[in-house]
Image: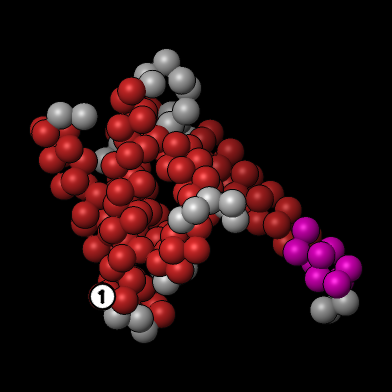
């Protein structure tokens, strides 16, 4: 990754991490300074995964998959850094990371409205069916698991 690519990636990643820290502060009441070391680790993993994606362009894994693999390897019990890694990254709430991701996903879809319009009205019906069946499928699984565990 050259300096220009690093700069371009950093211009996107740092605001995302800032949003994660803000969501962390608002949702969990934790100060951004307390979660900052975990955010720095997230930044490093993101940059490393983007670099691996550039090094291995023929491997059909997205950068997200590389980031997941790196985090998995760092968090495994036999990893020499797993205790430090887990202590620092556990201070970042998963839910606070999803809020900015969903916002950016919405923005990216909003930028593609012309493409969505060209798909015709049938995509609306398919989307409603997919969302509804996913919701009811998740509800049925949750119901079965909660009954099996005698919670309800």
Relative depth, front residue between 41 and 24 = 41
Q: Which residue is mark 1?
A: 33
Find residue 132 and report its horizontal and vertical position in percent.
Answer: 64, 52
Relative depth, front residue between 138 and 16 = 16
Q: Is residue 116 above or below residue 28?
A: above
Q: Secondary structure at mark 1?
A: helix
Identify the residue shown where x is 35% and y is 54%.
42
Relative depth, front residue between 20 and 91 = 91
Q: Is residue 88 above or below residue 3?
A: below
- The C terminus: image quadrant: bottom right
Q: For residue 143, say whether it is visible.
A: yes
Q: Residue furthest top?
A: 58
- The N terminus: image quadrant: top left
Identify the residue shown where x is 50% and y is 63%.
83
Relative depth, front residue between 139 and 22 = 22
Identify the residue shown where x is 34% and y is 56%.
41
Instruction: Say left or right for 151 vs 46.
Output: right
Find residue 30 and report its horizontal and vertical position in percent.
Answer: 35, 81
> Magenta residues, as a range?
141-149
Q: Name the main secondary structure of what is drawn in magenta.
A: helix
Q: Quadrant of residue 5?
A: top left
Find residue 123 and report its horizontal and vertical position in percent.
Answer: 51, 35
Q: Is residue 143 magenta?
A: yes
Find residue 38 and report its horizontal and vertical position in percent.
Answer: 35, 63
Q: Is residue 53 above or below residue 146?
A: above
Mark 1: few, some, or many residues within 10 Å (few <14, many ≥20)? few
């Amino acid at each position: 990754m050259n300096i220009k690519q690093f700069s371009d990636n950093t211009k996107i990643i740092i605001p995302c991490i800032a949003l994660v820290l803000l969501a962390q502060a608002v949702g969990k009441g934790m100060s951004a300074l307390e979660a900052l070391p975990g955010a720095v680790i997230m930044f490093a993993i993101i940059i490393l995964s983007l670099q691996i994606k550039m090094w291995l362009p023929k491997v059909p894994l997205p950068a997200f998959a590389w980031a997941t693999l790196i985090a998995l390897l760092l968090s495994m019990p036999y990893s020499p850094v797993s205790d430090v890694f887990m202590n620092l990254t556990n201070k970042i709430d998963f839910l606070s990371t999803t809020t900015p991701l969903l916002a950016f996903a919405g923005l990216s879809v909003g930028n593609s409205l012309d493409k969505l319009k060209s798909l015709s009205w049938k995509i609306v019906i398919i989307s409603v069916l997919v969302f509804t069946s996913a919701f009811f499928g998740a509800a049925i699984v949750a119901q079965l698991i909660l009954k099996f565990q005698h919670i309800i």
